[in-house]
Image (cartoon, rainbow, N blue to C red):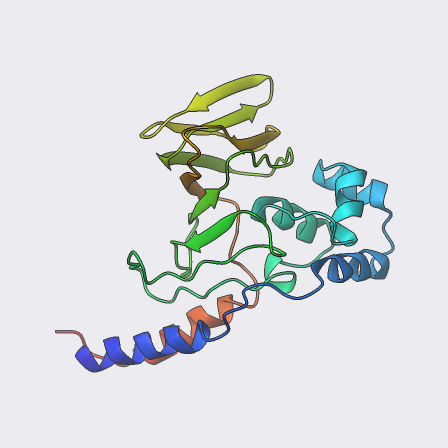
Amino acid sequence: MHDVSIAVKAMDQVQAGDKSMEMPQLGETIRARRHAVKKTLVQVATETGLTAGFISQLERNQTSSSITSLVVIAKALGVTIGDLIKQPAQLRPDTYRGQRQPYSVQSGRVKYERLSTVFPGSQVHSVKFTMPTGYKSEMVSHEGDEMVFVLSGKVGYTVGKDSYVLNVGDSLHFDANIPHSIESLPHENEASEVIWVGTVALFDGPQSAASEDREQLLRGTEFF
């Protein structure tokens, strides 16, 4: 079992070897794909619930996007989020403070740390993210549940017509089909840290091959 743990850890290190967890020129990638499927900005906006102005700015690399917004954009374009951005692989079920690889989307202000792995039948995805004071996401909606737990700072959430202010230790669970957004509220000049858990597929795509590699590694190994 010790040898298997070493081998799995080595695979994790190989997968995490690329320190840049975002593809260059994300906007160009999105625009090229939109043109390939012959969709207008308005069509993509209608399908995603995002504004045409936001998508246009994203295509011109004038703004960044939340991961969940990229999920719905990818779906509208007929690809997966893994075709748009690179995220750290997480082959093991356990993660440890100080060992997770932070990443962002298009050099955005929000820093993410992946918490969940992927295995056949898995339905829950999770990240920890850190937002600077004053950050506010775009309104987005997508299928499934979403739940957040505040680790530090002060967070404002808008879900449909309802608004919530969450402090350290507070949580929120809601239907993600309802348009929602998050912002980091002023709080002693402190950034806000949040644990996000949801059923929308944040990590499907090219990284799913890592799960197959891990299964192949463990197949035929006896555990005592």
Q: For the view shown, which residue lies furthest in the left direction?
A: 224
- Left or right? Give the position of 113 relative to 151: right
Whether 19 is drawn above or below 166: the answer is below
Whether 207 is drawn above or below 42: the answer is below
**Can residue 219 be spotted in the picture?**
no
Q: Residue at x 53, y 59 (%)?
A: 204
* Number of numbered discs: 0
Residue 16, given in percent of the width and then of the height, sits at 44, 71
Q: Nearer the viewer, residue 56 or 74?
A: 56
Q: Nearer the viewer, residue 59 or 220?
A: 59
Q: Nearer the viewer, residue 104 or 40?
A: 104
Residue 193, given in percent of the width and then of the height, sits at 41, 40
Q: Residue at x 40, y 64 (%)?
A: 90
Residue 120, given in percent of the width and then of the height, sits at 42, 61
Residue 41 in which image quadrant: top right
Quarter placement of the N terminus: bottom left
- Left or right? Give the position of 3 relative to 127: left
Q: Nearer the viewer, residue 195 or 44?
A: 195
Residue 67, given in percent of the width and then of the height, sits at 57, 49
Quarter placement of the C terminus: bottom left
Q: Residue at x 26, y 79 (%)?
A: 6
Whether 170 is drawn above or below 146: the answer is above
- Left or right? Give the position of 174 relative to 66: left
**Can residue 173 be spotted in the picture?**
yes
